[in-house]
Image (tube, rainbow, N blue to C red):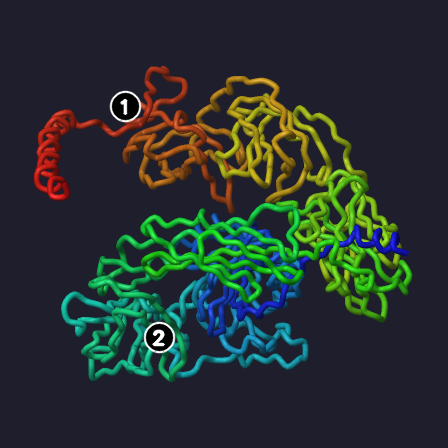
Amino acid sequence: MRKAIYFIVVFLCTPAFAIAQVVPTLGFTEIMYDSDGSDSGKEWVEVFNYGTDPVIVVAGSAAGAYRFFDGSLHTLQLVQGTTTIQANEFAIFADNAETWLAAHLQYTGILFDTVLSLKNTSSTIGLSLTRTDPLFTSVSYDASWGGNGNGYTLERAHLEQFSDLTVSWSDSAVLGGTPGSWMPPREHDTASSTDPSGDDTSTDDTPLPPPDDSHDVSEGDNGAGHDGEISAGTSVEVSYFIHLSEILPNPKGSDSGEWVELYNESPFTIDLAGWQLQDATSRVYTISEADFSTTDIQPLGYFQIPREASDIALNNTGGDSLIVYAPGGDFRERTDYTGSAKEDAAWALIGGQWRWTTDLTPGKANIGSVDQKPVASFTIEESERYYIGESITFDGSASSDIESKQLQYFWDFGDDTTDDEQITTHSYDGAGEYEVAFSVTDEAGQTTSASHLIHIEIPVEQMTLGEIAPITFSPGVLFITEAVPNPDGSDDAEWIELKNASDHDIMLTGWQLDDSEGGSAPYVFSETVVIPVHSYLVVGREASKLSLNNDSDMIRLLTPLGQEWQTVSYEKAPSGYSYAYDEINQEWLWLTTPTPGAITTFDDAEFPRVLGTIYEASVLEDVTLVTEEMQGSLVAVRGFVIVPPHTIGSQKLYIASAGDVASSPAALEIYQYRGDFPGLARGDRIEVTGEVSMVQGRPRVKISNAHDIVFLEHSQLETPETMSIIDISEEFDRSLVTIQGTVDRVNKKSFSLNEGDGRITVYLGDGVAMGDLHLAKDAQVSVAGFLQYQSGTPRLRLIDSDDVAAIKVSDGSLQSDGQAQEQIEKPAVAAESPLRPWLYAATLPITASIGWIIKKFFLTKFQ
């Protein structure tokens, strides 16, 4: 008996599971699910924080990070702004953030990149706290409500009562929607609309804004119809267009010079009479015509409220708040500053974030240098597993701030224990999953945070036989139902799902999950893990440490004695698919839409199955032979590198076949999630072995690591023939092209070329700096690059600075490729002034004099 107990104990350790979290106060307010034309890269949704506290969105691919749901779960990546959504603030989730920003140049708010594949008929979208949690907010929309390919978004009727499922949705008030703000949707024909609650109670009584929150657009208010503006006489809620812009809490000299500035981002003149301001005290000031010559704020204009009128005294030390209320007392906006207010410095909204600036701009757009937030970064002592009572080192020394020499540190270990050291140690008293929150604060009082989940387990020797429940059920009651061995993106998103089909809770203490024998170490469930009646349990790779192979593997469920309870085998796991058990037909199938923690239905219309035979690996000499039909197959393909790694992003490179390098057929993308590529250059011929997947309607080959690429030889690539800008079409997408034109605009990371009626933007590759090109406006240049189309717009990617050359002009026209090569010069530099050498010479005595003065009058003072 003692031997049996000892054998059981040897296999036992504990998992980590998420602790309870507060439900975020986020709700969906706008959906672009069916844009005019192609939906590719154009889909986006808007969320709104309707609560009173900030909501921190955990981005990334960790198990405890947020997930966006559109039928499957997708991770979020922050692109612009901060992960903290303040009360009454909006955020955008875009399918392609780069494309979205190019179409919304004025947007400065929070932007996340994710995957959106929204149906144009009807669907459900939502958000979950983790990849295993249920959705904490969701909307089931229908095309009959509006926004169905007419250029408008689908917008929520009002920003209150997010728990009310009967709230109406309709076409947005303007074409393209109102990302980052809100206007009451225009009326939509509800004769054929679908009731959101499904109780046949929906009518055409769309909630209207309160009278005090609206503005009647009359003739002369620039009103219009459904072409993107508001028609005359329409009642439009404009209070959401009034924003705090700038505050001066500590003016130079007397504090009576304090002021507050509001900004009107709408195209309407708005009367501010009745609007209210409040600081951190109970003092409330109501804007009155008695205090101003006019209380109107002009379209895109500013309105300054001096302390003399408001009698609001903002604190110079200890921080303060300023709150804005619409007429009637409805909260609209708030800003807070901490620490001390610098003299003659404004607390201003710059680039979508509140910052201190010494450039005061009353009545104008805010400008000026800003104090940058610190960077919070920390590491946890490396270990395969962490145990109760074990001392673990937490290191925040990688944090930095470009302005501050001194940073303040704060740790919250998730178990009601905190610390304020840069590097510290901590041990946990109980098993489970803990979120370690770390923040740094700079000398200006700005704080940034980072977090990480840590799994704490019970050491094997501390688990006893008494904690293991006897097995009183059959294999048909507890079994593996679904798994994702090869997720899109990082393999850290792998998971395995178990089901309890019984009428009783099942305690999993001592049960084990494992892959093939000799693979990963078994994962042992702790005494805290229970699968409720008729429920599912999803075990992620981050908790289990099981690494499932993509080509073939086994998933085994073992009893506490290590006996096999169930074994599931698979081969060639397609990227992003789940392997799921059809209980009715008693067969395992590959599904395109995983259903973690939920009932899996096997409706072919909604869950297409993988049909046919998985391709065997074979060497392909032509990259165009890699097709959509080969999705999920393992292939080997050869080609020449035309876009090296880390040139257009860190995760991809492009290859073309020998005869296609300088012609039209599209190149093939090679993808590696972590950017693990060998050193490669243009012209290298390589052989790539990987799995075929699809991205934006095109095939690509996904590799595991740098060893999947074999160098064969190097050749000098031919220069593509020059083509006219107006002849560029999607036929040349993902191809090398050469164009000529006149430089008409130069930015930090791009420049544009004109040629007659044609115009194209050239974007610099990651290894090219604008300073290396020395481009001058109106210079006539030849550019060779990699052509890409995004949402129907061509973009030329410059791979190397040597691919830009100036062109001599003899008769006012550009030289063609057929003309003499000596006509081409490099680089395209602006003409050097003949006075430049003399200016250099003149600065020498001045520099010497300054140096002598510093030494004479300053340095000697400190000796």
Q: Which part of the image, by quadrant, shows the C terminus?
A: top left
Residue placed under numbered mark 2 in the picture: 323
| Quarter location, residue 452 | bottom right
Q: Is residue 122 visible?
A: no
In front of the other: 89 or 404:
404
Reply above or below: 4 against 636: below
Tell me where residue 369 appears, x and y as whole percent: 28, 53
Lower position in the chain sequence, tag 2 or tag 1: 2
Q: Left or right: 608 with respect to 814?
A: right
Distance from label 2 to label 1 (Cα)? 65 Å
| Quarter location, residue 784 | top left
Q: Mark 2–mark 1 contact, CB under 8 Å?
A: no
In front of the other: 248 or 19:
19
Residue at image location 23% in from the left, 65% down from the top:
363
Q: Secondary structure at mark 2?
A: strand
In front of the other: 474 or 684:
474
Name the front one of labels 2 and 1: 2
Residue placed under numbered mark 1 in the picture: 811
Reply above or below: 85 against 114: below
